[in-house]
Amino acid sequence: MPPALRVEYCGEWYDLLAGEILTIGRAADLVIDDNPELDSLLLEIFHESGLWWIASTAAARVVQVSDPSGRVSATLEPGTRVPVVFHPAHVVFSAGRTTYEFAVHGDLPYSASATSAELRPARVDLPRLTAAQRLLLVVLCERALRHPARDPGDFPTSAEAAARLGWSLTAFNRKLDNVCDRLDRAGVAGLRGGRGNLATRRRTRLVEYALAARLVTVEDLALLAEPEDLSA
């Protein structure tokens, strides 16, 4: 019987049949790395109710499940699960300063394609951010960091973020370009393009990735002055 699902990581393939469970982590069926910051058991992949699922068994780590380009994605919180719908589906998470990715292939509801330039390597060694670049990410992710249940797509406009930081809009956009360029060179997809692509879609991808890869955390909110009103 041919495998119903195939998982690829760093050139190695793991076959999975309905009724089987594939565990993923530091000490699992699919061993990602011996990185001590990585969960021993991070994820499970299994078939149930006619769908393939990815379930989080992590204590605190957030995982991103997306199409190859990263344009359509779902955030997998600890203790939750999401259906695998894209062929291939890309699963991204970080541990310490390293981001990992594996791909899931199979007879899934939606087919997705990506150019070779859009595909990311299996692990991304994240660049060290400057103080200004970290501040920019914190202000873009501020609402999601303060209110985790809030939609990550709810973030300030460039003008609002620039005003929050006391920067000019030109300075903010220049630093935003720099952050996107650095992450793109590190292998993060969905952040390249001309200035016309720096609007909602690129910022959405940047915020989703910054949160999933823990480029910024709740502790980084201390870098910002207390807001007068975050409801807007």
Image (cartoon, rainbow, N blue to C red):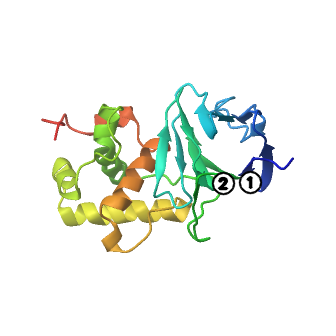
Q: Quadrant of the C terminus?
A: top left
Q: Residue flagged by tag 2: what amino acid is it? A: Ala
Judged from the image, the secondary structure of the residue bearing numbered disc 2 is loop
**How far apart, in angstroms, are the residues tagged by discs 1 and 2?**
6 Å
Above or below, 128 against 48 in this view is below
Residue farthest to the left, as pictured: 228
Decide if residue 45 is in sight here: no
Pointers 1 and 2 in contact (C-beta within 8 Å): yes
Residue drawn at the location 40% of the way across and 59% of the way down: 179
Task: Write down the residue under mark 2.
Answer: 122
Q: Residue flagged by tag 1: what amino acid is it? A: Cys
28 displayed left or right of 57: right
Q: How many marks?
A: 2
Task: Write down the residue under mark 1.
Answer: 10
Residue drawn at the location 61% of the way across and 37% of the way down: 54
Residue drawn at the location 42% of the way across and 48% of the way down: 208
Residue farthest to the right, as pictured: 1
Q: Could you say where residue 203 lies in the image, as x and y percent from the top left?
A: 34, 57
Nearest the viewer among 22 and 220 is 22
Above or below, 118 against 99 in this view is below
Nearest the viewer among 157 and 1 is 1
Nearest the viewer among 152 and 133 is 152
The crowding category of the residue bearing disc 2, from other C-alpha atoms within 10 Å (few below 14, some 14 to 19, many at least 20), is: some
